[in-house]
Amino acid sequence: MLLLTTIAEARSACDRIRAQGKTLGLVPTMGALHQGHLSLVRAAQASCDAVAVSIFVNPTQFGPKEDFAGYPRNLEQDCQTLEAAGVDLVFAPSAEEMYPAGASTFVEVTGLSARLDGASRPSHFRGVATVVTKLLHIFAPDRAFFGQKDAAQVAILRKMVRDLLFPVQLDVCPTVREPDGLALSSRNTYLTPEQRRQALVLSRALLAVERKARAGELDSGKLLAVALRILEGEPGVVVDYCRIVNPDTLEDLPEVGHGGLVAVAARVGSTRLIDNLLL
Ligand code: AMP
């Protein structure tokens, strides 16, 4: 497995892969890898000849008071995991490599970027869209793999790829969960055992909504009331949003007759967690 840190090296490695007639899959991550990330790697390996994983804690997607400095970083262990998984190439650039001094160009998917997490994290999706644009330019992959766990990110990147004519297919993989329902996240390592228990309320609320919708309730207001009752029953958890939206536009849906995305974000202590389910 190659571990590369410069854009020039990554570009030449991709050129060599393409020269052999191989297809390339890209899995962008911020590292601190878990089984959710590895499910994307496996999906990439199942459909592409070669797989590249990027590990980059992207400063532009963190707000000034967010956890950029403390975000878990463990490149050595991540590389061991990816090597054992049979990944071909890891790209772990510095912030200076990805954002040369004076860089002032950003990509913003207007409208969508201000919804869901974008409402409470105002420059978050601009940072995500910008870094993914850079990664797609560096790797020019045939396919890029993302998790349904970050549903708003998926909607925004799909729109960006369409609007800006990127010649790439986006693949979205299901959320991987702990056996008790907690969605895997690199941020779960911040949780104390008590907070870890409290955090289960997110998936519990989503499942209750799904059950109620399956039983025939179509009214989003009534479905959300079920979720909020469960979320508010856990005093350690402060809800940021809980909404039922169109998964493509992220706009609120008054009813779920044609499906919908139920998405929640909440703080457990100082850790912000997100989760969602497609109805
Ligand atoms: P991150 O390192 O948190 O930026 O995530 C990198 C990629 O892994 C994103 O496309 C995430 O949506 C995806 N991902 C994170 N957690 C999970 C999970 N529990 N299940 C599936 N994919 C995930």
Image (cartoon, rainbow, N blue to C red):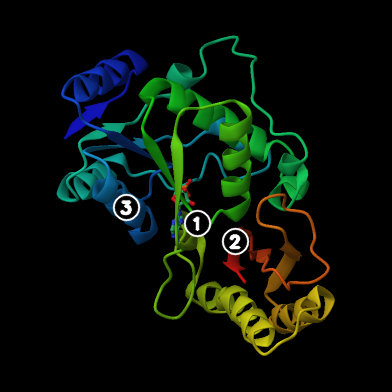
Tell me which corner region of the image, top left, top right, bottom left or bottom right, holds residue 264: bottom right
State which tag comes first along the sequence, 3 or 2: 3
For label 1, being within 8 Å of ligand 1 is answered yes
Name the residue at 46% across, 28% down.
167
Q: Which residue is mark 2?
A: 273
In which quadrant of the rendered image does the N terminus lie?
Answer: top left
Name the residue at 51% across, 32% down.
132
Q: Residue 139 or 99: which is nearer the viewer?
A: 139
Counting from the top left corner in percent of width and height, residue 260 is at 68, 66
Cβ–Cβ under 8 Å for marks 2 and 1: yes
> Secondary structure beneath disc 1?
helix
Relative horizontal placement of residue 70, taking residue 48 as reference (left or right): right
Counting from the top left corner in percent of width and height, residue 226 is at 75, 83
Name the kind of residue labelled 1 in the image: Arg
1 or 3: mark nearer the eye: 3
For label 2, being within 8 Å of ligand 1 is answered no
State which tag comes first along the sequence, 1 or 3: 3
Q: Residue 254 or 115: which is nearer the viewer?
A: 254
Relative horizontal placement of residue 5, taking residue 80 as reference (left or right): right
Q: Which mark is residue 187?
A: 1
In which quadrant of the rendered image does the C terminus lie?
Answer: bottom right
- The residues tagged by marks 1 and 3 sit, at their Cα atoms, a distance apart of 23 Å
Cβ–Cβ under 8 Å for marks 3 and 2: no
Q: How many marks can you see?
A: 3
Dot 2: few (<14), some (14–19), or many (≥20) neighbours within 10 Å? some
Q: Which mark is residue 115?
A: none
Q: Which residue is mark 3?
A: 43
